[in-house]
Image (cartoon, rainbow, N blue to C red):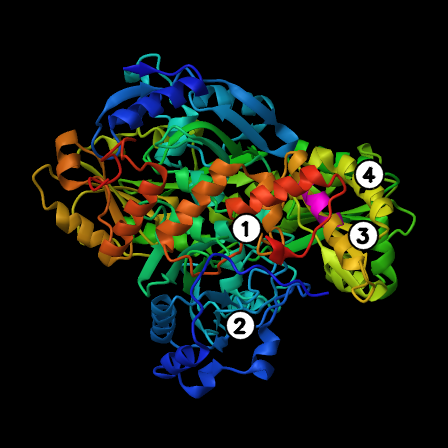
Amino acid sequence: MLTAHSLDDIVAAVRNAHAAHAPLRIRGAGSKDFYGGLLAGEVLDVSAHRGIVAYEPTELYITAKCGTPLAEIEAALAEKGQMLAFEPPHFSGANAGSASATVGGCVAAGLSGPRRQQAGAVRDFVLGVKLVDGTGQTLNFGGQVMKNVAGYDVSRVIAGSLGTLGVIAEVTLKVLPRPVAETTLVFDCDAAEVIRKLNDWGGQPLPISASFWHDGQLWLRLSGARAAVEAATGKLVGNSTVNPEKHWNSIREQTHPAFAASPLWRFALPSTAPCPELEGLRAIEWGGALRWYVGEVDGDHAAMRAAAASLGGHAVLYRAPESLRCREGAFAPLPPALLALHRRLKKAFDPAGILNPGRLYAEF
Amino acid sequence: MVNMVQNNNIGIRVDPATLEQRLRLFLPAHCLLLGEESLRPYECDGLTAYRELPLAVCLPETEAQVIDILRTCHSLGVPVVARGAGTGLSGGAMPHAHGVVLSLARFNKILRVDRTARIAVVQPGVRNLAVSEAAAPFGLYYAPDPSSQIACTLGGNVAENSGGVHCLKYGLTVHNVLRICVVSIEGEVFEIGSEAPDAAGYDLLALMIGSEGMLGVVTEVTVKLVPKPELAQVVMASFADVAQAGDAVAAIIGAGIIPAGLEMMDKAATAAVEPFVKAGYDMNAEAILLCESDGTPEEVAEEIARVTEVLNAAGASDIRVSQSEAERLRFWAGRKAAFPAVGRITPDYYCMDGTIPRKRLAEMLSSIAAMETKYGLRCANVFHAGDGNLHPLIMYDASKPGDWERAEAFGAEILELSVALGGSITGEHGVGIEKINQMCVQYATPEIEAFHRVKAAFDESGLLNPGKAVPSLHRCAEYGRMHVHHGDVKFPELERF
């Protein structure tokens, strides 16, 4: 295992690996090791390259080195009444020991939490990255300002690229104020009704910041100005609940029993898509656009993918044994022309193909 | 004053007759413009200082024709410049002298507005405002609202990642487009993004949006529609000092408020606007702020009260809150008419687009004041204050020898100061041909090289909009040398590069 304590360490490790054509497996806390395909190559641990570089609450950005724990960033933001609005999951619970999910891993994985339906995804908040490409070159894309259309928007592409285009050495994220008021309502309804309801509400100016359905119950979170939350609460007529923060945290971190299933499939669909003719629906989130299914280890995986595709979406084999993810591919296969484009882009940043090979797609 | 722009390294020059013959094989006569008289209207976009006549203008009506045009140009080695309404302000749609302009003007259909899914599927030639108009019966609208929204098209918005006065709260084009169909220079069709969240693979949508027609030609766009807020109200505050106004902006954000719009105009801008629009601006103020709040009536009342409190504490000399929709629109009318209003008091103006960290605003404005003296030209400043995007309007007279050159040098200095202050040379207008030299200031060689590799991954032939958006390293080297050798920046004719 290689340990990087600084940008220079990262550069040196990548240069050596590039020269030797030796794959590297970039790792922060390892909290998302379960996600994606193959974990191949020598581990390059970047968790020691950490620390908040700049945080300007009135400029709405924070810049941090890749190994900075998400928890540290969120604590700094909370002190100023701000937050990462995409509510990223940490997935570093008790089992991960002391390791805490890092901001570099958060951006590389590109996973957003419950608030995504209102605030947007990780990529919507990436303002800039310092990237070490597959040749060991340090590249700065984007910056710290909200608007910047000079050059291709490479920094947003890095979100969700699972380390295959470069090592994120530092990242700048847009931050937002925490909502003044928040409340949670609970409704009894079935899956078909929940799709209808959520889309109906989505077309109205309601401050819905999260939705979660499981086992006949819909949980709805309202966030915003006090008056807006109160008005919406009056309009929607749901049941109130105690300790909703704990509930939403269990959704965000997937410690809720709905997610205790394997293999767990993540269906991203148009929010209005009807429920496919599949067994095993576990949960619905994001206003109907995200649905979780439990499959079978020796089930018809192609049928799962086909069901999602036929509704205009795609299915990810999210939590499953590594052997299964490597065999089936974690992510929906790309059409040939698009796959070829991905390979060319990969080559543009990592010509030797040494960074996290196979983690996103087996082909690169 | 017309600047002839370098032809970049596309070596082959096609015989125009061969090109015409090949295009006529599949393009009906009314889809092909040839000859100087027909081509003249296409010689420039909204940045009229740069002009060039193309060999031909194609006005395809079907995706199949777009594919055929691109394949033909690819096989003949002919540059292709895609064009929407031509309202861009950075010369991104300026033609190539040995190339074809591919106008998407006839791709002007709204294919679908889905009320329940809150999306619209449109062709790229559809005007920005037309999308909101089509969505209005459902209580929905398309959020990005560039000031040219009555004319500019969605295809152009995608190419430039357009913003507008409401993007602080509602985001830029990149935050509001879900999916596009793209044709590559080789005539291959890609569907990028999806109506479902987080499309599989790399986020190519983020790469395509703002790529200034360098990576592919967009033939279809799916956008997100959002519910129209029940009410909007605007607070107008006067300040005796621009630094104080800048601090007030930071104080609003610091108080945890993200207004729907947060704009600033300096005294030169209000002086130009007021006689034209009669918006009721405080003519004694050094700067005025417009801060819009939207949402439910209760929500707006709550936010307006908080904003007013913050503005008072920040030392505003006068605060007015719009009391009716008519008054709100009047307050905004001046801001929205700032460009034409400045156009009334000067023969020509040159609009800049740098972004800076908000806290550096006072510094930037005092530097601009010094540059007015240095270059002997006046400048009015309008500012998307909430997101740090400054639009200095440099006034000049193109008929006076040397005026344009001074305006251009003035602009270049503002952009380079934007970078030095930690910002960017362009917030929403794009690099185009206009800011190609300043790209060399914002980015170092390794990033410029990376951009060229990205370009090659999409367009190995380099035929899509050559010479725009990303400078050649040779050009940057020349520009750097010029800076060293001439302390007082002087921009010679571009062909010498």
Q: Could you tell which of marks 4 and 1 lies nearer the N-terminus?
A: 1
In this rendering, do the residues under marks 2 and 3 share a single chain? yes
In this rendering, do the residues under marks 4 and 1 share a single chain? yes
Q: Could you tell which of marks 3 and 1 lies nearer the N-terminus?
A: 1
In the picture, measured across the screen, residue B66 lies left or right of residue B43, that is left
Q: Which residue is mark 1?
A: B172
> Is residue A115 visible to us here?
no
The residue lying furthest to the left in this view is A298
Residue type at mark 1: give it.
Leu
Secondary structure at numbered mark 2: loop
Residue type at mark 2: give it.
Pro
Task: Name the spot of residue A246 as percent of width and height, x first.
Answer: 40, 26
The reply to whether the C-beta atoms of the residues labelled 3 and 4 are less than 8 Å apart is no
Q: Nearer the viewer, mark 2 or mark 3?
A: 2
Q: Indicate the quadrant containing the N terminus of chain B: top left, top right, bottom left or bottom right.
A: bottom right
Q: Which residue is mark 3?
A: B380
Secondary structure at numbered mark 4: helix
Residue type at mark 4: give it.
Ser
Task: Name the spot of residue A314 as percent of width and height, x first.
Answer: 26, 49
Give the main secondary structure, helix, strand or loop, of the magenta stretch: helix
The reply to whether the C-beta atoms of the residues labelled 2 and 3 are less than 8 Å apart is no
In this rendering, do the residues under marks 3 and 1 share a single chain? yes
Q: Which residue is mark 4?
A: B366
First to last magenta residue range: B410-416
Residue depicted at x 39% and y 66%: B77
